[in-house]
Image (cartoon, helix red, strand yellow):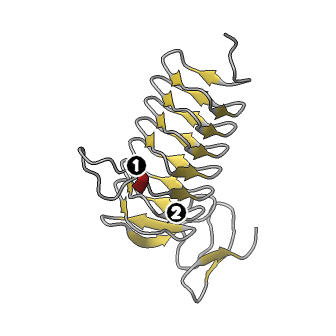
């Protein structure tokens, strides 16, 4: 049988169920399992022991660290970073003896978002673009773009720039000099760049 993916590295210990789509330049490492009908974009890196469930969509240039399971209903936009052992759920009230697959809830993660190690993302929420979820945080509500979220349950404790710097009171990114402003509705937006 011919290898169905062009310019893709798949470690010999990984399982890839067909049909699925894997973009060029993507690397899938030890003990991963890619389920049927999953879509993985170009230039992604999936670390050891990553599971990508049925119908999961991963954008381009994503990095998914070791021991992450992306269950049906999870969608990652381009440039998302998932830290080691972060957790996604897909049902709010699971029971082992009750089938609740019809209750799967979607979780959407916006472009350039970062999810820290051991963070938990409870299903049914949207994480805004370029948000930053601190290690160990538990997200139980929607997250604004650029928000820095920490704690259990997670709450906004600051703002992060597109470049990944925590913004001070002046809302000026120290990495790329982008100026941000807080809007009357509580959101943040870049003014230049």
Residue 161 vertical position relative to residue 43 in the rendered view, above or below: below
The total number of labels drawn is 2
Q: Position of residue 66 (x, y in %)?
A: 44, 35
Question: Residue 101 got which mark?
Answer: 1
Kindly identify the residue that appears in the image at 49 percent across and 39 percent down. Answer: 53
Kindly identify the residue that appears in the image at 45 percent across and 57 percent down. Answer: 105
Kindly identify the residue that appears in the image at 54 percent across and 63 percent down. Answer: 131
Residue 17 is left or right of residue 9, and the answer is: left
Quarter occupied by the N terminus? top right
Q: Quadrant of residue 104?
A: bottom left
Residue placed under numbered mark 2 in the picture:
127
Q: Quadrant of residue 157?
A: bottom left
Residue 192 is left or right of residue 18, and the answer is: right
Q: CA distance from mark 2 to mark 1?
A: 23 Å
Q: How busy is the neighbourhood of tag 1: few (under 14 within 10 Å), some, or many (20 plus)?
A: few
Q: Secondary structure at mark 2?
A: strand
Residue 89 is left or right of residue 22, and the answer is: left
Q: Are marks 2 and 1 in contact (CB under 8 Å)?
A: no
Residue 69 vertical position relative to residue 160 in the rendered view, above or below: above
Q: Secondary structure at mark 1?
A: helix
- Mark found first going from the N terminus, 2 or 1: 1
Q: Position of residue 79 (x, y in %)?
A: 63, 49
């Amino acid at each position: 049988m011919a290898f169905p993916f062009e310019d893709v590295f798949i470690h010999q210990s990984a399982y890839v169920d067909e049909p699925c789509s894997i973009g060029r330049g993507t690397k899938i490492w030890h003990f991963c399992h890619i389920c049927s009908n999953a879509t993985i974009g170009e230039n992604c890196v999936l670390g050891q022991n990553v599971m990508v469930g049925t119908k999961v969509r991963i954008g381009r240039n994503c990095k998914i660290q070791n021991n992450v399971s992306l269950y049906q209903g999870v969608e990652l936009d381009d440039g998302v970073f998932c830290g080691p052992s972060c957790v996604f759920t897909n049902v709010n009230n699971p029971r082992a003896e009750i089938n609740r697959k019809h209750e799967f809830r979607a979780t959407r993660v916006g472009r350039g978002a970062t999810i820290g190690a051991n963070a938990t993302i409870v299903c049914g929420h949207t994480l805004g673009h370029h948000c930053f979820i601190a290690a160990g945080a538990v997200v139980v509500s929607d997250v604004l773009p650029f928000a820095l979220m920490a704690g259990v349950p997670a709450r906004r404790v600051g703002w992060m720039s597109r470049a990944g710097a925590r913004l001070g009171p002046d809302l000026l990114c120290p990495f790329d000099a982008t100026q941000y402003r807080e809007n009357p509705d509580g959101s943040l937006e870049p003014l230049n760049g």
